[in-house]
Amino acid sequence: MVYNKVKFIVVTITVKKIKKRINMDKAQKTYIRLLSIMFLLCLDFLLLLVFLRGSLFQNILNLINLNSDKLTEAEKNLYNLQYYTAFNMIYRFIFSFAILAVFIAFVAVLSKLSKAGRIAVIGSYVSIATAIVVIVARALEDNKTVHKKITNSFLGINGDDFVTMQALPKLPIVPILIIIVSLLCLAMVKSSKIEKIRLYNKASALSGTSIYLVAMYGYVGIDVLRNNLSYIIMNKKDLACYNALNYLRTFFIDNNKILSLPISYILIFIIGLGIVTDKFFKKKIAGIISVLIPSLISIVIIVINVINKPVILGNVTIDLNICDMVDFAYYAFLVNFFITCLYINLMLVYIISVRGNKSQMLILITLNIILNLICQLIAKNFSGIAIHFVMWSVADLISAIVVLILMINIHRIRKKKRIEAIIGQRRKARKQLGEDDEDDDEDEYEYDENNEVEDKDNNENVESLEDDNQEILETNEKGVDDIKEP
């Protein structure tokens, strides 16, 4: 009997605990799902950034271009070079989309930005696409027919037999993990119904889609369209420019761990810094910090690269003309690195801290692309390749100045509206106190040199009080004299 009673008590207690777990509040379930989404997005971001990396195919190309001892001479052929170059172009583009979307989605869910669910869905799909590109590249690595077709499409060459190389891991474990994590994230986003939560649908809140659209379009305009179009124009000038650009990209840019990074890495750093400062500081201070810190970091990077400039004279070529051309172009590229970072920084500060209109930034990026193309066509008429990077700087500097003008303009408009709102509140308060409308019409406010509101009636009242005080003092002095006379 005692055993049965104890058993009954234990069973009832366990059943109650199970019921409590099953009958969790809807808010608790949603909270757990949101935490799961953030965990999966963070895991996806780490897999992309640390294990897969944006320089996956670029590292293989560096082994071929720099004549590395890790490869045999037979593997360093033109077909392998063109194969990995083609996949590098596709992978770099999709990878930048994925890592930007995943990072912005994580920040949006964490900071309760609007449209966070949409960015999470986009990030998951593009992460799956990135993993599929790596798996396909690994599957076709030994296929000579694909190598020949890619080389023929790029260079128009149909050669004899060659040796393929296996540079990618045999088992694509990391891409498979990325696909699994992304699918789980899609399921959690759907089950959490994040789009219907009020905190993620505030009209006045900062939109995750605005940040993503501006950042992604900025990446496409700078890292895809501008760079590739400029390199095509430079390659078509003459043989000296072709060789100089090849040496610049191979030994100075692509071989540099920082300068070879996609623009998406810089965008991630700026977006993260902008959102963090926007949460903990006032908007003006947040904007200044968001511009100042990346600018100082870019200056430090430029100084380090100037000090550690690679030397190609005697190591790669003995042509002094080409060496001078490469050196001038390298310095112009570093200057453009700073100006481009400043331009991107100001755009994102305009969206995050100033809460500006994203359509204005999208139009500005389009104009920047057109202006860059015009500048490159002008630079085509000059000798050397440094002029092309100078034209990059000119277009980006003009765009940065336009963003600054928009910031100043929107600041003035908002300050004027704020002052008008204060004036309206004061007038309403006076009407509630029962003052006449005529007195309200006579009250006028104006700006002083420091854009502060002054009240003329208050000044008049102060002057009248001072006159009354003077009269009282004069009467008191007369009264004292009258007392002294007897």
Image: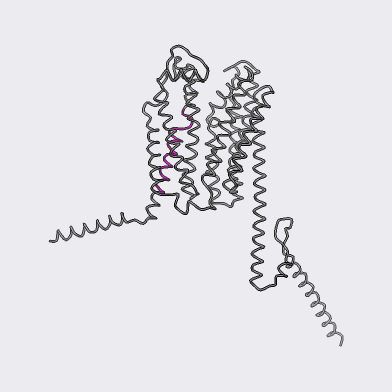
Question: Is 118 situated above or below 65?
Answer: below
Q: Check the picture and name the quadrant holding the C terminus.
A: bottom right
- Which quarter of the picture shows residue 41? top left
Residue 174 locus on image (x, y percent): 39, 33
Residue 455 locus on image (x, y percent): 72, 64
Q: Is residue 80 magenta?
A: no
Q: Is residue 51 magenta?
A: yes
* Viewer-proximal residue among 146 and 175: 146
* Viewer-proximal residue among 33 and 3: 33
Taking the view exactly as shown, the residue that stands out farthest to the bottom is 486
Residue 135 locus on image (x, y percent): 40, 29
Left or right of 73? Residue 6 is left
Residue at 55% x, 39% y is: 215
Residue at 71% x, 55% y is: 450
Residue at 59% x, 16% y is: 317
Magenta-drawn segment: 34-56
